Amino acid sequence: MESHLVAEISIGAVRHNLRLLRERVGSGVRICPAVKADCYGHGLELLWRVIAEESDAMAVAAASEAIELRELGYDGELLMFFTPCSLPAGEAHQTLKDLISRDVTLTIVSLGGLEAAARAAGELGMPAVVHVKVDTGMGRSGVLHDLAAELVARVRAEPAVKLTGLYTHFATADEADKSGALLQLDNFQAVIEACGGGEGLTIHAANSAAAVDLPQSHFDMIRPGIAVYGYQPSGEMQTVIPLQPCLRLKSIVMQTKELSAGSSVGYGLAYTFDRPSRVGLVPVGYADGYPRAISNRISMRIGGADVPVCGRVAMDQVIVDLTDVPAVRIGDEAEVISADPSAPHSVESIASLAGTIPYEITCRLGGRIRRVVVA
């Protein structure tokens, strides 16, 4: 199965996208791409070098991701969003030591997290470098904005900890109505002022959407995610920049057969042919992240034509109608996902049909897909 299903990952597209973002924010703003979740499913091992070349720092979610990136060879600034303090005490302590010793910048959201980082740093005899994350209205991780100044003061007073940044995250920057994001921005500005200003700190807030639509949120650094890999943050953006998707997923035609009019196919026999038809079998399914929700509503590109997927998407395979492309033979390529955002089988199109977002489509790409770098 692995040889049948290949994701071509374009480093040229990633480079293009990062340079577009650089043009958008200007040379004075640092870029810290989010490379968590295996670069949103595209492959950290394949992409980290080109991202490092075009960026100033990188960000991950979990400790395992931070350690993996260091082991791959990245020695630049590395911010981790999660705190390990929710782990069992002994595991949390060792994880903190592993991160601090690898020069990973930790996120502090509570006094308990500060104390844990200080203990680990004290044992190592080296400071824990940290950023404080502020919840300015999303209700997710971070210290509540009205308590942030007090926590920042405690962090600054801890000799085993070095505060180098302050940040927040937007909940609605990708929506047409920016009022919620602007309220969060006001709350964040108030926190910065309450902390004595941002001098000596890296102040950051902007995700992909804010990097494009809210220039007032750029501060010292942006943290783009989905835009790095070539997908628009949403369909409600005020400004659309010409991003290039970096993913193309291909498989093959594994079998063909002739069916008579009235034949039904797939689980539940959910599709019936109204004419004599030639069908093909393509080895890709929901185990590979190809959503079952798009059954009977999506196409693939085979033999230069867009051919419909017929019947339900199964775990490992789908049926396609090849009647109108009679020259197609076993072993011919089937383009499952196009790198053209306007194609009917682009990541954006698949996400729309599945009732989800591009992030989920790429992050769910399965482990048996072989990822390869292309220009």
Image (cartoon, rainbow, N blue to C red):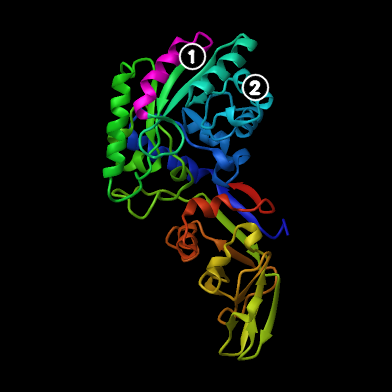
- Using the image as rendered, state which of residue 182 and residue 369 is in the foreground: 182
**Residue 375 in view (yes/no):** no
- Residue at horizontal 50 percent and vertical 8 percent from the top: 159
In the rendered view of the protein, which quadrant contains the N terminus? bottom right
Label 2, secondary structure: give it: helix
Q: Is residue 314 above or below residue 235?
A: below
Q: Main secondary structure of the magenta part?
A: helix
Q: Position of residue 229 (x, y in %)?
A: 49, 46
- Tell which of 220 and 135 is nearer to you: 135
**Which element carries disc 1, helix, strand or loop?**
strand
The amino acid type, in three-letter code, at marker 1 is Lys
* Picture coordinates of residue 108, whole percent (x, y): 49, 24
- The part of the image, by quadrant, that contains residue 193 is top left
Between 142 and 7, which is closer to the camera in this rendering? 142
Q: Position of residue 284 (x, y in %)?
A: 65, 63
Query: For the residues marked 1 and 2, what is the alpha-carbon distance in whole angstroms?
Result: 18 Å
Q: What label sits on residue 41 in the rendered view? A: none
Residue drawn 60% across the image and 53% down it: 365
Dot label at residue 162: 1
Residue 287 in the figure: left or right of residue 210: right
Q: Amino acid at mark 2?
A: His
Which tag, 1 or 2, sits closer to the chain's start? 2
**Total labels drawn:** 2
Badge nearest the viewer, 1 or 2 = 2
In the rendered structure, find residue 93 and report the number of the disc placed on it: 2
Q: Residue at x 56, y 14 (%)?
A: 118
Q: Which residues are magenta?
A: 145-162
Residue in view at x 67 percent, y 68 percent: 317
Do labels 1 and 2 touch, CB within 8 Å?
no
